[in-house]
Image (cartoon, rainbow, N blue to C red):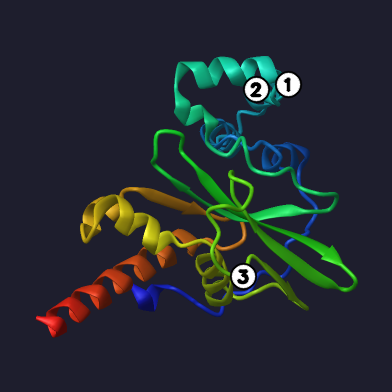
Amino acid sequence: MSDQIDLNHRPHTYFRPQALERYLLSKVKGTVLRKKLRALFDAGQHAELHALLDAEGITGEAQKALESFHPMFMGGNCLPDTEDGEVEIAGISINSTTCDVTSVYARPADGAIHYRVVDEYGGDTLQGKAEARTDKPMTLGEFTDFFLGAWPLFAVLEANFGDDLEQSLGFFSAASEFYPDFDLLCRLRVMEYFTQQGNHEDADD
């Protein structure tokens, strides 16, 4: 699997011009709703997409109705708003009752790129360095190290499933418009971590 991933992949930019629908889509926080919108966009169903964006863009009353139907519709809605010029680079969602999401935002400033990792709990789930600055976009490898260094995915999985790798891999999903292999690399890192932990336990026996 690792030979299928280019760790040195570096996006040309994070701040390219976007179609209006995709720009608006990037501003929708809810994970479930965004997946529905993205499916419509990718299928070319722009009339339906515009209707949903207009209707679900999303009012507080509509959001409360969705959340009352199922807590999964809360996923991502409590993330901080993006600042002017800021875009979401990637996000990791977990299949908890509320489908919690952790994301990385980036913005251009002073000739550099400023990154911040954000969660839905005011930063309470973050444990490492949650901000960074680079002169050019990070490579896939650098970006993944930064994200997983700020938010403890491995610890979250262990806390929920112990050493059960299969259930752990089914508990999260990662996505990025800029790093197509981000989800695949996260899964590889999880498998490597569990293998290392197993080896340590064998050595202790």
**Residue type highlighted by circle 1:** Asp
Query: Which of the 4 quarters of the picture holds residue 105?
Result: bottom right
Instruction: Name the image quarter holding the N terminus.
Output: bottom left
Dot 1 corresponds to which residue? 54
**Residue 171 against residue 97 in the figure, above or below:** below
Would you say the residues marked 2 and 3 are in contact, meaning their CB atoms lie under 8 Å apart?
Answer: no
Residue 88 in the image: above or below residue 146: above
Q: Which residue is mark 3?
A: 129
The span from disc 2 to disc 3 (Cα, nearest Å) is 37 Å
Q: Quick one: quadrant of the C terminus? A: bottom left
Q: Secondary structure at mark 2?
A: helix
Specify the amino acid type for callout 3.
Lys
User: Residues at badges 2 and 1 in contact (C-beta under 8 Å)?
Assistant: yes
Amino acid type at image mark 2 = Leu
Q: Secondary structure at mark 3?
A: loop
Please identify the residue farthest to the right as the structure is shown: 110
* Tag 1–tag 3 contact (CB < 8 Å): no
Task: Name the residue tied to disc 2.
Answer: 52
- Relative placement, left or right, of 183 versus 52 is left
For the point 73% across and 37% down, the residue is: 24
* Neighbour tally class for label 1: few under 14, some 14-19, many 20 plus, Cα within 10 Å: few
Q: Position of residue 164 (x, y in %)?
A: 21, 57
How far across and how far down the image is residue 3, in percent? Answer: 37, 78
Task: Give x and y (percent) for residue 71.
Answer: 46, 26
The residue depicted at 13 percent of the width and 80 percent of the height is 202
Element class at badge 1? helix
As drawn, is 70 to the left or to the right of 48?
Answer: left
Few, some or many residues within 10 Å of mark 2 (<14, 14–19, 20+): some
Question: How many C-alpha atoms fall within 10 Å of the one at disc 3: few (<14), some, or many (≥20)?
Answer: some
